[in-house]
Image (cartoon, rainbow, N blue to C red):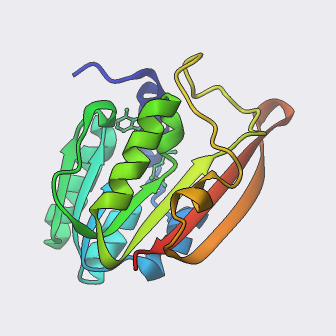
Amino acid sequence: MTPPDPVDFFERQFQRQVRETDFALNPFEQLALPHVAGAVLDLGCGLGNLSLEAARRGCSVTAVDASLTAVERLRAAALQEQLAITALQADLAGFRIVRDYDTIVAIGLLMFFRKERALALLRQIGERVRPGGCAIVNVLTEGTSYLDMFQPGEYYLFGTKELERAFAGWAVLTAQHDSFPAPGGTRKEFATIIAQKP
Ligand SMILES: C[S@@+](CC[C@H](N)C(=O)[O-])C[C@H]1O[C@@H](n2cnc3c(N)ncnc32)[C@H](O)[C@@H]1O
């Protein structure tokens, strides 16, 4: 499989993190963790830190990412701890969610697709969460000026309220905006939603 370009960006980052055993949960994964339960799908799982912590708490997890370094690290850690994790290396550009889950997570993923694909995957997430289950989605939004990890034209910055509109009718447990400085005086603007399906 030839990885898409953003994945090269993350491959390099993940290889360094594996060398340095830097496996801390990021702030969005920490926010998500209390809401992760049951059968979990972790799309764009990265190094799998959230998947591992969820499985340690009794969840059965399917985790998907295009980064071989990330998937191999997750498989090795899951095997060592005998955790219920299936880690798949796949390009999510063409991926279909084929069953229902109690929790579907997509942290820092959907902006790596063109608008049509990003919104189609967001719709699938909504359809595949079981009633009573949670969707946990985090994306970069308009106003983000740090674009080094994107291929020109091959990304989508969400509208600031777009996630809330997508989950209209769900119980919104968390909806927040975060702004972080990035290299070269740029910024990353994030929207996060944790929503429970009626
Ligand atoms: C910002 S990182 C987030 C990783 C993890 N969810 C976290 O919170 O640390 C984005 C992840 O999306 C993955 N990714 C980007 N484009 C992808 C694609 N087309 N198919 C599969 N994974 C992709 C990258 O490999 C990377 O692991």
Q: Residue 8 sits in which quadrant?
A: top left
Q: In this view, does 87 lie above or below 172?
A: above
As drawn, is 9 to the left or to the right of 187?
Answer: left
As drawn, is 162 to the left or to the right of 24?
Answer: right
As drawn, is 146 to the left or to the right of 19?
Answer: right
Please tell me which residue is depicted at 56% across the width and 76% down the height of the picture.
172
Image location of residue 183, percent across then percent down: 76, 35
Is residue 46 at least partly visible in the picture?
Answer: no
Q: 14 or 51, which lies in front?
A: 51
Q: In which quarter of the image is the N terminus?
A: top left
Please tell me which residue is depicted at 58% across the width and 33% down the height of the picture.
156
Is residue 196 at least partly visible in the picture?
Answer: yes
In the displayed image of the protein, which residue is found farthest to the right? 185
Q: In this view, does 96 lie above or below 156?
A: below
Looking at the rendering, the quadrant in which ligand 1 lies is top left
Image location of residue 142, percent across then percent down: 73, 40
Q: Quadrant of the C terminus?
A: bottom left
Q: 85 or 117, which lies in front?
A: 117
Please tell me which residue is depicted at 64% across the width and 37% down the height of the picture.
157
